[in-house]
Image (cartoon, grey):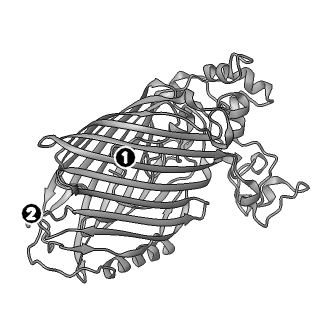
Amino acid sequence: MKRIFCILTAMLVLAGTASAKREKKVEVDSLGNKIKTGWNFGILPSVAYDADYGFQGGVLTNVYYYGDGSQYPEYIHSLYLEAAYTTKHHGIFRFNYDSKYLIPGYRLTLDATYLPDAMCDFYGFNGYQSQYNYDWHNWNKKTSKMAHPEEYRSRVFYKYKRDLIRVAGDIEGTIYKDLKWNAGLGVLGYIIDDCDINMLNGKNKFDSSKERYEQKALDPSVQGLYDKYKTWGLIGQDEMRGGWHPYLRGGITYDTRDKRQGPNSGIYADAFFTYSAAFNAAYGQQATAGYNHLQFNATFRHYVPCFKDKNGINRITFAYRVGIQNNIAGRSPFYMNNYMNTLFIQRVYYEGLGGGNSVRGMMANRILANGFLYANVEFRFRIVNFDIGRQHFFIGLNPFFDLGMITQPYDLDELVKLHTGGEFTTLQQSVAANGDDYSKYFKGSVNDIYTPHMTAGLGLKIGMNENFVLSADWGMPINKQDNQKWANFYVKMGYLF
């Protein structure tokens, strides 16, 4: 905790001293803060922590232009640049632009992102239908801490290599007052492979004469879950190496929020369709044209002010979000089913379901299915407002409850028939033919598929000028099949929703 406290303190101090802005107005906003004008920017270390990605180090800058301040805390232009890498071999290289004023009357968002991931999480299909075995990948230098060291297989048993390239442009126009139309286009490029064991081992060499759990080096002979899914026929040859997917998106939004970042009141609702094509499979594999598909998304967010102090400043907000994503035509490749579609790209990650960007406290990508539903509920307490130099800060606390569940599961037997050409008619037959025990990997009850995944926790927010928010969340799973650890910890930028 000392290390986390130092990171938060350093970011707070740097953020308070990094502005190149001069105050031009004495007016105050609804919170009693001086209205910001002109350009505001700071170069900060991209220091963060995510239980799924590890400690992050790099650099970022978020440049805001407020003009004469008449629309503050709304900005006229926002430019975001980040380059970072984590201790679990995950990279972030991102540019994002957002404005309602570049094209008068329209909101425009542009995003270009590259996310290399040497150890992407993969826990199988259909949530609880896929058994999670903590001891299979839990390694510790002190083997006495392992409950069953003889069951250990590999630290990357539930991992595979995945690089994601994302380029997108989205635009919004007004239909009538708060009702908007939305359109966007972009491309998602996935490059997928088995984990690079030699790279991950580095100078450590695996010694086959020793027990696997006695050494840090990974055993290259161990078949991970991603490999097994290919062998069993759950993942086809035409999707196992990824592919390129241009998409076209359109829908409507209804937005009455008082501000986009950390709103205190209002409703945001959207409904949209995304058509994704498929071509040019990675590494010269078979064409992925069979994976053209159409998805439907709907989201409802509500922000309810609960308490204002004697100065009229809102201190408590009740906020909740409910969303659904379903595949309504065609087939989507497995690696696209944990990407949460959005009308505007505002964050680095849109992984779901599980992890700090969807269901906090649950392992990343724990739920992987054709369709899913999710909900987030939290109280947002603004504890204190204060200034450092000419920058306005606040500190808040957010207790929360998150939920995710499957609405469209995979038919595992049908996948096996499809990908093995009918060699096997059931998954159990295919698993047995590979010498594996079906009961260690899967449960047979349909109830296991539709059982909700739930977590709860507490968040800490440190905000600057209402738009720049540092977020630290502790999330705890209700069911240990979602995470054997008592809680996961995340340090990120911005509110979850």
The residue at 83%/62% (across/down) is: 205
Q: Dividing the picture into quarters, in which one does residue 329 lie? A: top left
Mark 2 residue type: Gly
Name the disc covering residue 210, or none: none
The residue at 34%/80% (across/down) is: 18
Which numbered disc flags the more N-terminal residue, 2 or 1?
2
In the displayed structure, would residue 211 be above or below residue 402? below
The residue at 67%/43% (across/down) is: 283
Mark 1 residue type: Phe
Q: Where does label 2 land, which residue?
A: 312
In the displayed structure, would residue 480 be above or below residue 260? above
Residue sitting nearer the eye, 227 or 181? 181
Q: How far across and down, in percent of the image, does residue 313 sit? A: 13, 63
- The reply to whether residue 461 is in sight is no
Q: How many numbered discs, if any?
A: 2
Kindly state the secondary structure of the residue where label 2 is placed. Answer: loop
Q: Dividing the picture into quarters, in which one does residue 271 lie? A: top left
Q: Dividing the picture into quarters, in which one does residue 133 lie? A: top right
Residue sitting nearer the eye, 147 or 129? 129
Farthest residue, direction right: 209
Kindly state the secondary structure of the residue where label 1 is placed. Answer: strand
Q: How far across and down, in percent of the image, does residue 55 sit? A: 54, 65
Q: Where does label 1 land, which residue?
A: 401
In the displayed structure, would residue 114 be above or below residue 480? below
Q: Label 1 neighbourhood size at 10 Å, few (<14), some (14-19), many (20+)?
A: many
